[in-house]
Amino acid sequence: MSSTDGMNYAPTGKPAPVVKAGEFPFAAAFLDHGHIYGQCNGLREAGGELRYVYDPDPARVAQFCKTYPGVKPVDSFERLLENPEIKLIAAAAVPSERGPIGCRVLQAGKDYFTDKCPFTTLDQLAEARRAVAATGRKYMVYFSERLHVESAVFAGQLVHEGAIGKVVQVMGFGPHRLNAPTRPAWFFERAKYGGILCDIGSHQFEQFLYYSGATDADVVSATVANKANPQYPELEDFGEAHLIGNNGATNFIRVDWLTPDASRTWGDGRTFILGTEGYIELRKYIEVGRGEGGDQLYLVNNKVEQHLSLHGKVGFPFFGELILDILNRTEKAMTQEHAFKAAELCLLAQKKASRLS
């Protein structure tokens, strides 16, 4: 797993299978973003069997098969759609293509697990809602900054146990390193990546809904800018937004592509959760200026003032829950409405955003 490039962030955890060998075969497709490795790692550790892969680029397929020996390449996406043994297709396509691909997967009678952002337009979201309603299949999203970060998982447990009372505000900071020479051409095309609030902002809006318990929100304000990369005129390297949830909780996010070179990690991601009886701070990937790594959680409430280092101690329950949801047609890992609402908020924030000079 790369600690310097967020595009190749693919955590590994301890195997925690929830099914027997061969009970949950799945496939991977469209390997445009490195998050596909994180998606597959999580599913495999939960007992899923990665059987097939498709991508139009032979070099990407070769690298994928090197990482996952025994996976069988297929020569067309239709082969995956037609294969009755495959229960789920995981994909990390170019963002503007994720929605249409997902609808094809659902219409083929399979469940879909896409990298974030799941859509780049509201029309794509509407079409996916129709596809889910018509097929009964799942359109799940890999919001890795919560689902694949142990401190973020544990923070959710604390919040839902009432450790800080009722959540009043969630603030999320998602800086990323640009690494421009390693990025594909689509990364710099606004229509293909959707804008910074749509793209990496989607993590932050999802976390707000999850931690606060809000089921909807209004976008009060949003701004985007290109502050440091005029050579890429369609790139937005800075974005911020302010939301108010339908339960009164508020949200402020800041995302950027401005991580400096000296940082040991691709982004000093942090989350602050304020409650009526305490607060939580997450330092997800790094302790700046110290030797410790990420997954640091700080909890202060009416009983404790506590620092917890959580790497390797919590695990990633989402993936096993997702597999069981697919087999049992339940919604314990994430509800469909939650996934779609997080996507809707990032699209609305992007649409409302004013551009700063």
Image (cartoon, rainbow, N blue to C red):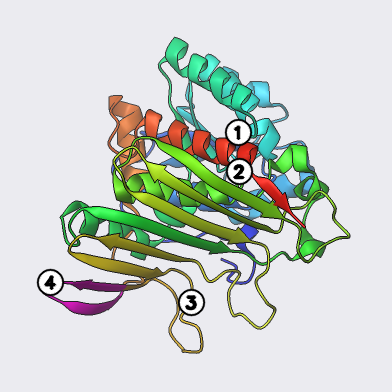
Q: Label 1: few (<14), some or many (≥20) within 10 Å?
A: many
- Please name the residue that numbered disc 1 is placed on: 119
Q: Nearer the viewer, residue 182 or 76?
A: 182
Q: Is residue 168 toward the left or the right of residue 244 in the image?
A: left
Q: Label 3: few (<14), some or many (≥20) within 10 Å?
A: many
Amino acid type, callout 4 = Asn
Mark 1 or 4: the one toward you: 4
The quarter of the picture where the C terminus appears is bottom right
Do residues under tags 2 and 1 come within 8 Å of each other at their CB atoms? yes
Q: Say what secondary structure mark 1 lies in.
A: loop
**N-term-proximal mark, 4 vs 2:** 2
- Judge whether residue 274 can be spotted in this image: yes
- Please name the residue that numbered disc 3 is placed on: 286
**N-term-proximal mark, 1 vs 4:** 1
- Please name the residue that numbered disc 4 is placed on: 302
Q: Residue at x 17, y 57 (%)?
A: 165
- Judge whether residue 14 can be spotted in this image: no
Do residues under tags 4 and 2 come within 8 Å of each other at their CB atoms? no
Q: Position of residue 15 (x, y in %)?
A: 35, 56
Mark 4 or 2: the one toward you: 4
Mark 3 or 2: the one toward you: 2
The dot on residue 198 is: 2
